[in-house]
Image: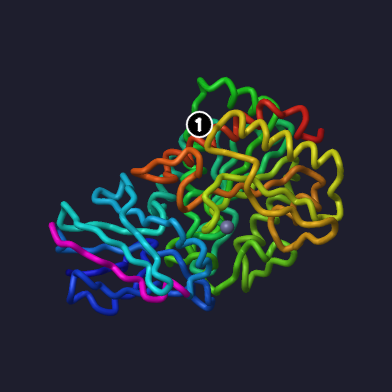
């Protein structure tokens, strides 16, 4: 058996693969950071073998609760990702699998490669209603891509960013679903929104971490969702160039799309702890969440993060920083690595396809709540 991870987004260290019944692996930590949990590797020459893959450093991963009731994903064709038997024994994450092909890929969640990202951008820009703008470069020299749907002076400015944490690939699957809907000229909801708004998207806030196979940080170990109060060219040029652009355009509604390692739910977090929080913003937040829950059974409002108490927001978070600065509703959307409890899928768990559906529902919710949630 051969284990490899030298590809876009790959992450594993192989300690010993001589015994298929006891393949010893470790996850590499993010460069210049202690975070690790994202893994993505290929096992070759494994057809019909009973394999046990042991990730030996799982207990020290960033979110140990993430391993509870967790099942890894696998794929033969790198398109369809299915769940495989996985357990956590307090020390090792143990993946058990008998492959019916010569090669099989395993990952923490369905990977979203930088090659696929490039394909998505290329596809989007051919839509006549889409403009692609490169805002700057990352520390590894990759481009920071921003897509604009609709006319610049169309009215309300909607900003949606995703994948500040590169291991949260569900966030970019969500973006792909959104973009596939935004390019559809026959979609009446999209047309209605673009008549009165311009939508700016950053489908991947962290290209370097994505390509390097990081969980949470960029090329130099910066957690980008702790950089919005004071981004710098040295530590966080990704945030710096996006914030510059948002400052130019203004913002009337914002969404920051993430994944949560531990919670088996789709949920939204607000910005309750910011100085500018008020009753109107609370009502907007509740209305948007309730509308989304009514539209899509995969979303719920019961479980999530406890809101910050008044005045206790961490202003280095994207959502808190933008909500305070622009006096608008800005929310953080979280999706699970595991599955959405209550609407679970035994084969795939939470999946790229359902991420895309949830993105569609978010557009529908915005359309339905428009007059209440856009301050204009
Ligand atoms: Zn995140």
Indicate how the structure is coloured in the image: rainbow
Q: Residue at x 21, y 64 (%)?
A: 51
Task: Look at the numbered disc 1 and say if its residue's Cβ is closer than 8 Å to ligand 1.
Answer: no
Q: Residue at x 24, y 69 (%)?
A: 3
Q: Going by the picture, which residue comes out furthest to the front?
A: 89
Circle 1 packing at 10 Å, graded few (<14), some (14-19), many (20+), is some
Q: Quadrant of residue 251?
A: top right
Residue 375 horizontal side relative to residue 165, left or right: right
Q: Is residue 274 above or below residue 125?
A: below
Please check the rendered image and state whether residue 113 is part of the magenta-colored stretch, yes or no. no
Q: Is residue 269 above or below residue 123?
A: below
- Residue 142 pos. (x, y %): 49, 61
- Residue 2 pos. (x, y %): 20, 70
**Ligand 1 quadrant in view:** bottom right
| Residue on which the image places disc 1 | 181
Q: Secondary structure at mark 1?
A: helix
**Which one is in front, 224 or 90?**
90
Q: Quadrant of residue 197?
A: top right
Q: Quadrant of the N terminus?
A: bottom left
Q: Please count the marks in the image.
A: 1
Please check the rendered image and state whether residue 56 is part of the magenta-colored stretch, yes or no. yes
Residue 275 horizontal side relative to residue 212, left or right: right
Q: Residue at x 66, y 53 (%)?
A: 305
Q: Quadrant of residue 254?
A: top right
User: What span is colored magenta in the figure?
Assistant: 48-59
Q: Quadrant of the C terminus?
A: top right
Residue 100 horizontal side relative to residue 343, left or right: left
């Amino acid at each position: 058996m051969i284990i490899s991870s030298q590809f876009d987004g790959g992450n594993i260290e192989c300690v010993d693969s001589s015994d298929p019944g006891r393949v010893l692996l470790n996850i590499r930590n993010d460069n210049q950071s202690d975070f690790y949990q994202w893994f993505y590797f290929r096992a070759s020459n494994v057809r019909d073998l009973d394999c046990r893959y042991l990730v030996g450093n799982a207990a020290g991963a960033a979110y140990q609760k993430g391993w509870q009731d967790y099942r890894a994903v696998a794929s033969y064709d790198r398109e369809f990702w299915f769940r495989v038997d996985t357990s956590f024994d307090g020390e090792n994450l143990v993946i058990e699998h008998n492959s019916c092909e010569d090669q099989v890929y395993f990952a923490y969640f369905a990977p979203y490669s930088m090659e696929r990202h490039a394909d998505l951008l290329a596809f989007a820009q051919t839509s006549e209603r889409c403009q692609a703008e490169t805002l700057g470069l990352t520390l590894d020299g990759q481009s920071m891509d921003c897509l604009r749907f609709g006319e610049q002076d169309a009215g309300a400015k909607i900003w949606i960013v995703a994948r500040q944490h590169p291991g949260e690939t569900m966030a970019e699957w969500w973006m792909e679903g959104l973009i596939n809907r935004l390019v559809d000229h026959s979609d009446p909801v999209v047309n209605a929104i673009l008549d009165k708004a311009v939508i700016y998207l950053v489908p991947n806030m962290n290209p370097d971490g994505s390509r390097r196979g990081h969980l949470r940080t960029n090329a130099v170990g910066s957690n980008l969702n702790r950089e919005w109060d004071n981004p710098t060219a040295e530590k966080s040029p990704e945030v710096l160039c996006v914030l510059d652009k948002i400052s130019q355009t203004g913002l009337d509604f914002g969404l920051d799309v993430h994944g949560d390692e531990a919670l088996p739910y789709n949920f939204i977090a607000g910005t309750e702890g910011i100085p500018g929080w008020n009753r109107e913003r609370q009502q907007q937040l509740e209305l948007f969440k309730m509308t989304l829950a009514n539209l899509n059974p995969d979303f719920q409002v019961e479980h999530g993060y406890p809101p910050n108490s008044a005045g206790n927001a961490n202003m280095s978070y994207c959502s808190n920083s933008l909500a305070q600065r622009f006096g608008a509703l800005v929310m953080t959307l979280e999706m699970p690595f595991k599955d959405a409890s209550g609407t679970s899928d035994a084969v795939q768990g939470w999946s790229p396809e359902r991420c895309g559906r949830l993105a569609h529902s978010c557009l529908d919710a915005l359309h339905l709540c428009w007059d209440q949630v856009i301050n204009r």
